[in-house]
Amino acid sequence: MSLTRRDFTRRSALSGAGVALAGSVGALATAPNALAATETEILGGEAAHGDGHGDGHGHGHGHDTVGYGPLLDDPHGILALPAGFTYRVVTHSGRTRLESGEYTPSNHDGTAAFDGPRGSTLLVNNHELGGPRAGWEHPVPLAEGLVYDPAAAGGCTVVEVRPGHHVAEWVGVAGTATNCAGGSTPWGTWLTCEETEDRAGANGMTKDHGYVFEVDPEDRRANRNPKPLKALGRYAHEAVVVDPRRGHLYLTEDASGPNGLLYRWTPPEGFRHGRGRLRTLADDAGVLQAFRCFDSGGSFVDDLSRATKTGTVYGVDWIDVPDRDARTTSVRKQFTGAQVTRARKLEGMWWADGGTYIVSSYARSESPGRPHDGQVWFYDPSRRTLTLKVLLGVNADPAADGAFDGPDNITVSPYGGLVIAEDGAGVQHLFGATDSGRTYPIARNELNLGTAEEPEYSEFTGVTFSPDGRTLYANIQTPGIMLAVTGPWKRHKRR
């Protein structure tokens, strides 16, 4: 049933139009350099939420601090961390090896952690490798029985971290392309997403790409004969989450010209989720829809870049996708300008607090609203509302260590708030955002891929906590390094 504009306007009036309908992460405010800092009605402007990262060390105004203190340079030139924290390398492309003897593939991306056997942790790690295999030194090996398209370089591996830090790694799926953020399921599997629209015969591919595949980290036999989940559509997939109560899947699309969409897949009546059940569905099973937002006055919102302050709340309708397999026209191009809402670089998602957190990395000239360097939204399926939680202003000096820009992969921390992987320009961080909106650095990438005169740092990806919450796993995408960070984690209180 559609949420009418009248219903949404009435709800907004009752709750206070523009006031966040928040989950436990609360009304996350803008970072101090954000566009909307002086406009923020929830917290009363910049002075109300302090300087969360003005010097890159997480200090606030006066003695009010958040985070873990200054980041200390790493003598090994990989990862700067606060005092008391340590890291270890779990996998390193071209150095560590799979059980089969081949090197760990490169370009680590989305990752999720699961409880494994005998006290181990299982991590499924995407490898964002696009185009022909010949273009990559360390593609995902074509493991027998696990290959979708032998021409494609991407896929994902399963990494087992056993007590004592012994590590084993093997292929989960191979022959897929540009495997990006993905997402875990409540039934303990991983959905790996292809961020491409390559068709058979294009870019060296022998099969169509742009699909989602399911990978079981525990049962290797379940991964044989990979099957694309065509019911979820063919487009430049980024991330996916599952609503454990209603059974819906939400999916982001990282695309431009026009900007990408947020999708919802509703399973067919009577379908019950479980390990391997998605691959039993017909290609046209369920209903795939794209979102359409409107404000408290009932006006259509064409792009999420129109929002200029945190606490902005939009109502959401869902519009059926005409041709989910994009046989002649890309899915996002099948809609007219007034049918759907778009956003640039819809990236990571994470399910928590009864809904999903959704990242839009930036907006520039390709977006009709005001430029920004990152948004985090929260979609509440019970209210059918989308609330802006974080808004980062344009970073004037990305080369300077301080401001954050370009949020990408995201997780909800067991210690409160969010942990976000940065994919911006210049310096790259893992950073946190507390319930009240203060931001603070957790780590800085010190692996310089450029020169001393023109440094270059790869993005962070795959941020996720171990099931027991003690270890934060994250990747440096290039060359492809999985890191495990431990230390004196603490709960961040609301302020």
Image (tube, helix red, strand yellow):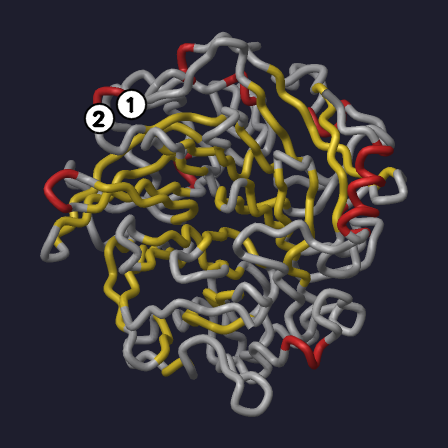
Within 10 angstroms of label 1, few (less than 14), some, or many (20 or more) residues?
many
Q: Amino acid at mark 1?
A: Asn
Q: Are marks 1 and 2 in contact (CB under 8 Å)?
A: yes
In whole angstroms, how far apart are the C-alphas of marks 1 and 2? 7 Å
Residue, far bottom: 62
Q: Amino acid at mark 2?
A: Asp
Q: Residue 399: which quarter of the image? A: bottom right
Depth order, front residue of 231/417: 417
Depth order, front residue of 237/206: 237
Within 10 angstroms of label 2, few (less than 14), some, or many (20 or more) residues?
few
Residue depicted at x 34% and y 54%: 465
Compared with residue 205, is residue 96 higher up or lower down, i.e. above or below?
Answer: below
Count of residue discs: 2
- Residue 6: x percent and y percent? 86, 33
- Which residue was labeled with disc 1? 223
Quadrant holding the C terminus = bottom right
In the picture, the disc for residue 383 is none
Compared with residue 479, is residue 172 higher up or lower down, i.e. above or below?
Answer: above
Compared with residue 224, is residue 65 higher up or lower down, i.e. above or below?
Answer: below
- Which residue was labeled with disc 2? 219
Residue depicted at x 80% and y 46%: 12
- Residue 158: x percent and y percent? 26, 39
Q: Confirm whether residue 131 shows in the render.
A: no
Q: Residue 196: which quarter of the image? A: top right
- Residue 127: x percent and y percent? 39, 42
Q: Secondary structure at mark 2?
A: loop
